[in-house]
Image: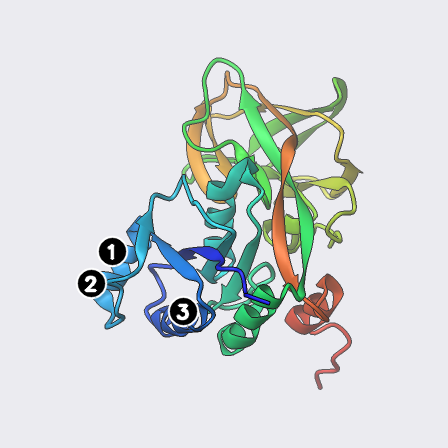
Amino acid sequence: MQQRQFRFALFGSTYQPKSSVAVGEFLACVARHGGKVSIEREYHRYLSLGSRLALNNAEVFDADSPDADFVVSIGGDGTLLRAANCVGASRLPIIGVNTGRLGFLADTTAAEIENTVEAIFNGDFDIEEHAVIEATTTKRRIKGSPFALNDIAVLKLDNASMISVTATINGEFLTTYQADGLIISTPTGSTAYSLSNGGPVMAPMSGVLCLTPVAPHSLNVRPMVIPDNAEIGLTVKSRSHKFLIAIDGRSEKCAESVSLTIRRAQHNIRIIRLKGRDYYSTLRGKMMWGKVVR
């Protein structure tokens, strides 16, 4: 049976010079299987200037319009988040090759590239559906993309004191957080910024969101898990009359007169997992659960 000629859209990190080795191996593996690779324009420019890879036959695409069967992210979780933002509602499946540090989302190693490409062409993989959240605002529009795979946070400005964040759930008053900020996290993002602020680990596809305060100025404020069909309303008060909104790390300033509504988006992000590799094995490996360190 003739193998299908898959098309891959490649995103990469411009902060990791060593990732070009993984790119070269990926390009060679796909070529051996008769596939095609196009490279995101900014990353193609970076590789052209900083590596010795032969990119003459590689097509180029703009970040907001990948045309492919699969999206490949080579870098860390930040690179995969950027790829997910560009994929948006197109439902293109993403596979992450980790050349960074921890790599919860991009959990395939550079040493596994050949096996990974082989598995994709053979259909030997699973696809996970990961929830996305979106932010809408009053009085102004968010300049960048309003969608987040990991989290949306409201934060104080660097030179400001704590902020007051009043939160409602489905229009009902919850509380006013006196803190450095508040994180609204998906299960996917529960092992990221939320976890570093004491939030719980939530398994993907668990159908929940978490509100995690950042450095709360009260000992009786704790993270709270709610259903992901809830609508979260936020208003912020600050001495500087401004605050930051960070959407998967993409931040911009807002005036305190701007109110936010955060809800689950209508689309999911599809992430490829190789057979025999699941979220819990990744969790044990990355967080060293069960390992005794003496």
Q: Residues within 10 Å of mark 1 (few under 14, many from 20)?
A: few
Let me know if residue 196 appears in the view: no
Question: Quick one: SS at disc 1?
Answer: helix
Which residue is label 3 attached to?
Answer: 31
221 sits left or right of 244 in the view: right
Could you tell me which residue is drawn at 36 percent across and 72 percent down?
A: 24
The answer to whether residue 266 is above or below residue 100 is: above
* Residue 45 - label: 1
Residue that extends furthest to the left in the rendered view of this protein: 49
Amino acid type at circle 3 is Ala
Drawn side of residue 182 relative to residue 14, left or right: right
Picture disc at residue 49? 2
Question: Which residue does the image show at 49% across and 58% down from the upper left?
Answer: 6
Residue 104 in view in this figure: yes
Quadrant for residue 62, please give it. Answer: top left
Q: Residue at x 43, y 70 (%)?
A: 26
Q: Residues within 10 Å of mark 3 (few under 14, many from 20)?
A: few
Q: CA distance from mark 1 to mark 3?
A: 21 Å
Compared to residue 141, the image places residue 247 above or below, namely below
- Check the picture and name the quadrant holding the C terminus: bottom right
